[in-house]
Image: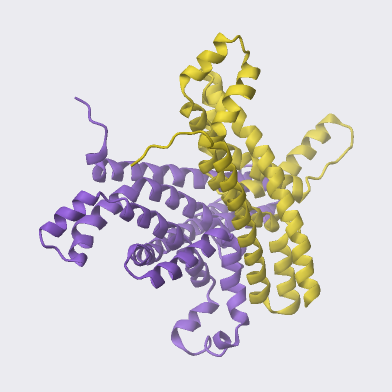
Chain colours: A purple, B yellow
Amino acid sequence: MNWEVIFRPESLAMYGEGFLTTLGLLASSLAVGGVLAMLFALALTGPSVWLQRIVGAYTFVIRGTPLLIQVYLIYYGLGQLEWIQARWDTVWPWTHFKEPFFCALLAFSLNTAAYTAEMLAGAIRETNAGEIESAQAFGMSRFQVMLRIVLPSAMRRTLPAYSNEVVMMLHSTSLASAVPAMLDVTAAASRIYSDFYLPFEAYLFAAAIYLACTFCLIGLFKLAEGRFLVHLAARTH
Amino acid sequence: MTAYYWSILYGAVLTVGVSLAALAVSILLGLLGAGAKLSGRTGLMALATAYTTIVRGIPELVLMLLVFYGGSIGINALLELSGTGATLDINPFTAGVLTLGFIYGAYMTETFRGAILAIPRGQFEAAAAFGMGPVQTFLRITAPQMVRYALPGFTNNWLVLIKATALVSLIGLQEMTYLAKQASAATRSPFAFFLFTATLFLLYTWASLIVLRRLHARYSLGAKRGQL
């Protein structure tokens, strides 16, 4: 074992930079994916059969194929399409398709949106019928029932399943290292491995970073559940 | 061009092979882990808890790289100490199967533990009353009944495992994803090849889902369902 190399300032700086990339990817893909997931969940539970079918097909495809292939499809694949090629030098949104961070972010957001949408849609469908009926009896419109009654409770009930999804997403960000020019924690470990030929130490240190992050996230969600799901906790007299 | 599609199809055989072999390892580890967690012995329970907590907290890719690159150095260091002069290389297939099996063994442990706990206690007491030993009890009483309770969680784990086999391409196993990437580099038409690979994965997960649903129906025969 040769841990001095890992704890040199240069190596630690590399892990630090990787850690920031990992956190940045996680936070931004959860934010974008969360907004998309909310829209998709509303479509899945909404009145339009066509929207249900389209979004259902989307989540089926995303959840049935590996994330690595989705990353490859967006990072390498889209560049093959002439329609994109004609635009990515000049026209605004398409210029981003040359940036590795954007491609990874897009793949991760679309992926987490599919999983989260299904969870949220499940929670919306399971909303107690009595709650909805009493809201309607108060004369609330469909929009108001959603906003005031269904969504606040459905989002809370999704929290335990969502914490799993967030941890999965943290682990999925390690796939960013498969995109060249991305330096996340895993890529930092790979670089230190190839520079010093110390695979065991390099990857073990990365594993420790991910483990610590996972425990922090689980702890945060426990706190959030204590705050938001207190009404569902077992009663102790 | 069509030759590349054929090679990816051949790669699918390897994908199926890796996933089934890893599934066998993970079922074995899952049964051992669930047994350890329910054994009531402090040492075994602590060991199994450490296993499931640590493995589920680290990305699959990092563990795989650790086993593939770190493992071969570790084994060769051990062989050097033994002084035989022999060397051993871990090939990507073995590393992939062992790592995926090890990781999903942790998820299977939790699934199997829950399934065994769902079996009514009276069943075990009746088995004991009939004079069955632990092995007989497991084969005749526990195993047939836990299948029904374990299948939903098992199905989820299996679908995630299938998708995780794509990661083995990153340590050099020439399965579908690896071949698709090579074909893309050679022909500069990555979109078509990755879409083809994604479709094959989709077919694989879809077919698994159908088989497992049938299995669930088979093992749920005779189970009473409450009328709402």
A31 vs A105, left or right, is left
Which of the pair B131/A7 is nearer the observer?
B131
In the rendered view, tell whether residue A90 sits above or below residue B210.
Answer: below
Q: In the image, what residue occupies the spot 75% across and 43% down?
A: B73
Which of the pair B164/A75 is nearer the observer?
B164
Which of the pair B197/B51 is nearer the observer?
B197
Number of marks in the rendered image: 0
Q: Could one spot residue B61 in this view of the protein?
A: no
- Quarter of the image containing the C terminus of chain A? top left
Q: In the image, what residue occupies the spot 49% across and 66% down?
A: A57
- Quarter of the image containing the N terminus of chain A? top right
Indicate the position of residue A172 as horizontal and vertical percent values. 53, 56
Indicate the position of residue A218 as horizontal and vertical percent values. 40, 43
Quarter residue A53 falls in:
bottom left
Q: Could one spot residue B54 in this view of the protein?
A: yes
A34 vs B157, left or right, is left
Indicate the position of residue A96 as horizontal and vertical percent values. 49, 79
In the rendered view, tell whether residue A98 sits above or below residue A235.
Answer: below
